[in-house]
Image: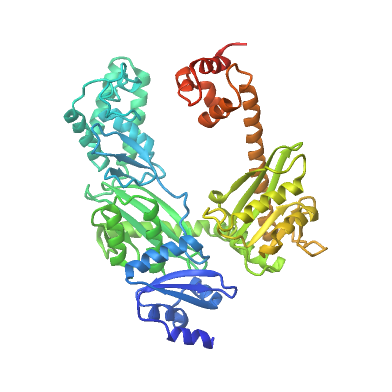
Amino acid sequence: MKDLKEKLNQLPEKPGVYIMLDKDGQIIYVGKAKILKNRVKQYFHSANTLTEKTVKLVEKIEGFRYIITNSETEALVLENNLIKEHKPHYNILLKDSKSYPYIRINLKDKYPRAEIIRRLKADGAKYFGPYMVGISAGKIKDLLAEAFKLSTCSLDLTKKKKIAKPCLNYHLGKCLAPCAFDVSEEDYKREVKKATEFLSGDDNAVKACLLAKIQTASDNLQFEYAIVLRESLQTLDNLIRKQIINSPRDLNCDIFAFAGNALFSCVNFTAVRGGKVLGADNFTVSAGAAAEDALATFITQYYDKNPVVADEIIVSEALDFNEELVARISKKRGGKVNILTPAGGLRRQLLDLSRDNAIEYLVKQGAAIASKEARTSEAVRALQSELGLPTPPRRIECYDISHISGTDKAGSMVVFINGEAANKLYRRFKIKTVKGNDDFASMREVLQRRVAELASGDISFSEPPDLIVVDGGKGQLSYAYSVLAETGIPLISLAKREEEVFLPERSDPVILRKDGFPLMLLQRIRDEAHRFAITFNRNLRIKRQTESSLKTIKGVGDKRARLLLQEFKSVENLSKASVQELSAIDGMNAAAAQAVFDYYHTAD
């Protein structure tokens, strides 16, 4: 404690990032500060004002590091990067998969089209959304086609040569078909302007168009089409009902409200566009920071993954880094975005509604959140104690081998971070050096290749694991240990029959409680590795069998069989290919393409 006090006194009065460490030297929290000395001291000298979650964080702190930055903005960016890299337990980390659909219209195109995207492109196009639960981006896109006849296909409309016949959308009155007809840019962009006005909140033109089309379809006895149009009108009515009473039509804002209890916190995100609530979502977080710090971190991460299309951001807490966050988000958007905490009026009502949703979510999800925490990060910490590991196994890798009678041998590597599957880090291995049915040698090859990749730049391999799990008993463990002994990476095997855990150089297994979360975590990891290996083995077998069947076709040998599968990915895609598409593959000729086509289209 004396050393800690001395280090606190030596902190600089400059902006930067501080990194909290536990007794094992693991990073458990990363924070930013305008003045490092003042901010870090608050954790240790303001115990009476800390939240319960922050108190739990402080209890774990055994040391800290800090990095001085040239500005507060640099501190904001560095904090975000370090959180992504180290994924500390007490920091907010927004999941990669959490992104929403938007409708994109690029006004710079000759004939702009409406398309649905989930990732921002820095191209100057206009983005509308996000569309969340209750509002389908696909149905909104269909409305644009129905009312304004905008092209929604993927044809290259910059080509001068027109196609012979327009697609079905033209005949259904859903497209002006600039691909086939000389539609003037002025006429087309007049409809684009109406579409963007609708997406910005003006519903009148769309409603009038749909009502007129319904009447025409009924008059012409096109009742099925009339039903389709009525479904589109229902989509529009659902959108109109989300209009906020007495709100200006140009109200475009993102609302972030923070709520927390003794154990967990929640951020509610609500999107308002054109005076309508497009939707809301709740994000569970286990942050150890103050609400204003956690909220600033969350907002930074959110806009790293989603486009900035709002004019203003409403927040429930005044942010220390408000000015820096405004500058960062405004730069990302390409225009000024204000961040405010309203004291009254319509915006305050919206903020209160967002906060109420966050609180309600915490109450309803409390048991589920606690259960997930026990099954993941708490199970990781318990594994350290149960297995006598040097550190909590934050990153666990598990390996398995799959084959049928020694053929199509496949190895799998799955990765769990803080007790949760990190699917993007999974890797597969095709066994190259082992002949026949030898699981032990196959496991040794896989681990040798994994260790060789420790110094690589591949994100799946560059970070060494805190624990490696192999599926099997003492024999499998022994072969694995022969590879890993010099690395110092902790290793165990999990034997399936009795679910016993074996450790190197220890004769007796460790028996974990059958109903305990540590064993359940190991079982989840082992089963996931098994599933991943079996899937890869099956794919290899199908590919081999398909290649073999292709080679029975006249003019198709090893090389062409491989090229066809590489191009079309599956037998289903290959069987649907036309002669022209088959001929276009490098290495194919017209005769071989015709033979392949006939193979899939000639009746037995």
Kindly tell me whether residue 185 is visible in this rendering.
yes
* Residue 559 place in picture, x, y as percent: 58, 27
Residue at 27% over, 65% down: 343
Q: Tell whether 189 sits left or right of 379.
A: left
Q: Is residue 163 above or below residue 277?
A: above
* Residue 577 place in picture, x, y as percent: 49, 22
Query: Which residue reaches farthest right?
Result: 507
* Residue 203 place in picture, x, y as percent: 25, 38
Residue at 52% over, 15% down: 591
How are the residues colored?
A: rainbow
Q: Closest to the observer: 600 or 151?
A: 600
Q: In which quarter of the view is residue 134 placed?
A: top left
Residue at 29% over, 22% down: 173
Q: Is residue 318 above or below residue 209?
A: below
Q: Tell whether 294 sits left or right of 387.
A: left
Q: Tell whether 503 sits left or right of 574.
A: right
Q: Closest to the observer: 312 or 27?
A: 27
Quarter of the image where the C terminus is located: top right
Q: Is residue 246 above or below residue 510?
A: above
Quarter of the image where the N terminus is located: bottom right
Query: Which residue reaches farthest left?
Result: 186
Q: In which quarter of the view is residue 94 placed?
A: bottom left
* Residue 405 place in picture, x, y as percent: 77, 36
Q: Closest to the observer: 336 or 86?
A: 86
Residue at 47% over, 19% down: 578
Q: Closest to the observer: 447 or 425?
A: 447
Kindly tell me whether residue 525 is visible in this rendering.
no
